[in-house]
Image (cartoon, coloured by chain):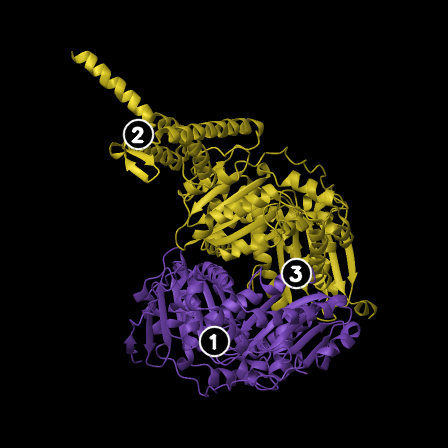
Amino acid sequence: MEAPAKKIIIMSLFSELRRRNVLKIALLYALASLLIFWIVGGSLIWLGAPDWAGEFVLLVLAIGYPVALIFAWTYEITPQGLKKSLDVDQTQSIVYKTGQKLNAAVAVLAVLGALALVGERLMPTFEFPKVIEPILLAPNYEAPEKDGVPQEIRAVTLDNGLRIIVWPDHDIPNVVMYNFVRAGGRNEYPGITGLSHFFEHMMFNGTSRRAQGEFDKTMEAAGGANNAYTSKDLTVYQDWFPRSALETIFDLESDRLQNLAIDPAVVESERDVVSSERRLRYDNDNFGRLFLEMNATAFIAHPYQFPVIGWSSDIENWTYQDLESYFRTYYAPNNLTMVFTGDVTAEEIFVLAEKYFGPLPAQEAPPAIRTTEPEQLGERRLLVEVDAPTPLLHMTFHAGSAVDPATLPLSILLNILVGGDSSRLHQQFVEQEQIALAVGGFQMEGIDPGLVYLYLTLPPGADTAAVEARLLTELSRVVRDGVTEAELQKARNIMIADYWRSLATIDGKAAAIGHAEVFRGDYQLAFALPDDLAAVTAAEIQQVAASVFHRNRMTVGVLRSPADNEQ
Amino acid sequence: MKAPRLRFTLLASLAMTGAFAAGVTLPDAERIELENGTVLILIENHDVPLIGLEAIVRGGAAADPKDKYGLASLFAGLLEKGAGDRTSAGFAEAAAYVGGELNASVSLESLTISAEFMARDAALMVELVSDMLRRPLLSADEFEKLRDRRINLIKAAKGADPGGLMPSYANAFLFGEHPYGNPADGSESSLANVTHSDLLAYHRDMIGAERLIISVSGDFDAAAMRASLVGAFGDWRPAAGTLTEIAAPIVDDGGRVYLIDKPGATQTYFYIGNIGVARGFSGRADLDLANTVFGGRFTSMLMTELRTKSGLSYSARSVLSRFAQPGTVFIRSFTETSTTVAALDLSLDVLQQLHDTGLDEAMILSARNYIMGQFPPRLETAAQIAGLFAMLEAFGLNASYINDYASDLAAATPESVADIIDQVYPAKDKLVFVILGDAESIRKQVAQYGTITEISISEPRFHP
């Protein structure tokens, strides 16, 4: 009894389900859900929503399914609008017509879905970036291994070779980003001198997504500021911004690495800007004038001889092809190191980096610099005659690279000789003998062996030869007698205090760990300075002085007025 | 010696909590006014083992006699050349030996000593600063040497980037005899007039406890630092002379050109402007917004036109110098000699555009975000914080100068900004031009901007 009755009930339930279009609704809903999930879920991920967003969409659609079915069962569309099915006079019912419309809708959705599937196949380049699982990256984060390194620092190298280091510091709600590009004067040759620096300018001048000026407008409107500089070894991009602008910065930085546009009209106008910069820093500044010629004379083979700003004729003449090939070669992720310091977590930076920079394709490593500067055989001299109210005397000696063990002792020695008003040469030349108005010096600590550079501003009408002789006497004295323990300790103290000053800001922190990573291969070496300084002995300094302050490493340059020459 | 009594121990901590929507909160400061008038401000901060100190003595180069510009600056320089028991070399050695930095300098309205030392050397720092102010050697020999060197350094600067000398020429020409026209570091000819006895008198008349503000921030214990500073300055004398009030400068009628001839210069450097506003200007927030958009950031109107679009210059800015009385507002740029007129005309067009269009809502928001976003790093180190508190105290500004800034910025409207623009930026026919370059190549062209007063860069002065 029961069984047949049940069957009838089931049968009539099934036919009633069909009559009320519940089955068609079920099919339509399922098809529409698939399409919605495919489109909305994909867009969410593409827009940067977290990965649970897709699951959320799916959940909402799933919850909606029984609701839609119950609704379809309960209500019916009539010419008078929605009515409860039970209230509708079966003879007046238009469920059949509604069913036809539903059939059509199912067909349309099915076709759309098929088209989308085919379309996806036909456009293999269109791919949503893969969803990032932060938890999966975690094991790859490199924590500090050496003693004395702040434990909160993390580093990672993405699959495409991009190196990223993060040092969280939540004192102020700001962030600093440095992007070190291994491209500078040393990567140039005659015809393209100054191209690295020019490229630095072009990196602000528009992409296929953003017109010229948009990069800066977007960044500044979000509260950020930026700058960049080019050296003989590197091109370095810097952003300083409030934490709230973090993702904007990633978007901007990845856009210009991915979609840089090199507009010929913009190139021409930017040539003029760079020429103006050259006139400002070199052509109308006597120090800059002599500096360019000192480098060009001290090096006869290695590209460190070229001015980073470029020779004027090159600034005027490099070509679009030069720029394009330069970008491809040097602005590849495997040639970059990025540092973030400030109000961030390592996790969020690595997730954003994977999302924005992960898609950048790695390129073949840039060609190695083959040229090694040959050994110098005898001193080199040069004279620059221009209008000069006060003559300048510059002197350089060939020295080592950033990783040369002699570099730190030499830095200490420079500090003893020219570091501040209490230094040897300031006290002797400026205060006691008054043969110079100012003395200074620095060491190029670059990728390849560079120079120790000493510079003196002399009083009007000074006897440059006599001052040069005095300078050489003082350098010989260091070679002969070395430095005192007190001088060494003072230099250590100054350098340690400078080290702490540099670490007092998130900008200084970014520069410190970035330079250690880029020039010495390990950011952790930045924190070894106090120990390294303690290890240097006076004897070591004397030894280094003896090997560097040698006539066969020396270039002497004088800048003065032609009139001074005739006197 | 009588122990100094504290007039009041402050709690008026310039509490600036919540001043910045972006999240910068100034630390609490302890302010103490000693009986002799010296103000001490202490802000503890233990981030790194450093201490920053800024000592400001009210009164500066604006008080220099007309024939002795650079007197106050020479005095400041000589403070570094020996004090207390230490000779010049010994004094430099004492600070350097511990890695400390110690500098004295002068601006128009104050003399400032800035020090930054490792925390362990706090006592030495206080000793050196108090020796400088109270017991400077002011040796005659050191004076002669320093004066001659300063004169020659000005000559050297004339062979370096001429941009460095532009403020001296511009202020001298715009302010004329008004004290704000004084070149703070003097000129070749005025320095030659300063004598050793002038410096001794300066110490007696212009330097004293009632003009002193000492602001210290960093890694120290406030009670110990207070005791140390009170011990060092509590029994100091006042200055013998009076501090003269500076009158407000009169706005220039415009149409004047100062042409500084540097033969052979391949680039022309120019300032265009007039008298601006004082430090305490009530429309400061609106003005900062306007100036950010006009010439205060990379995407400013001036940079966009003179650099990005035309390639005429590497840089073009609008700079406001604010003193106790109204200072200056100047457009500053430079360009190749042959494009001098093009760059000047374009600058004037951009100024007109600022007056004509002002700032819309979107631009105000962008400028506000920029100002607020760039603010926190200006107060990141102990030295910066010490400097800010000292500045507020020196200009008699209260906490609202910082406290209300964010809300003032937020309250700005296109109308309020437009009012300030009309009030502060000169109209096209009220401009003073200061132009340095190869006069022979540009003299005729720049005559269109007004009556030319010409001087050679080799002249030993900055005033016409």
Q: Amino acid at mark 1?
A: Arg
* Marks 2 & 3 on one chain: no
Question: Mark 2 packing: few (<14 Cα in 10 Å), some, or many (20+)?
Answer: few
Instruction: List x then y, in percent, for residue A385.
Output: 79, 63
The hue of chain A in the figure is: yellow
Q: Amino acid at mark 2?
A: Thr
Tell me: residue A536, above or below residue A292. above
Of residues B396 and B138, the one nearer the viewer is: B396
Tell me: residue A247, above or below residue B273. above
Quote the CA–CA distance across marks 1 and 3. Answer: 30 Å
Residue at the right extreme, as displayed? A566
Q: SS class of the residue under badge 3?
A: helix
Dot in front, 2 or 3: 2
* Marks 1 & 3 on one chain: yes
Q: Amino acid at mark 3?
A: Arg
Answer left or right for B160 relative to B419: right
The residue wearing badge 3 is B307
Is residue B300 shown to the viewer in this render? yes
Residue at the front extreme, as displayed? A91
Image quadrant in which you'd find residue B342: bottom right
The residue wearing badge 1 is B279
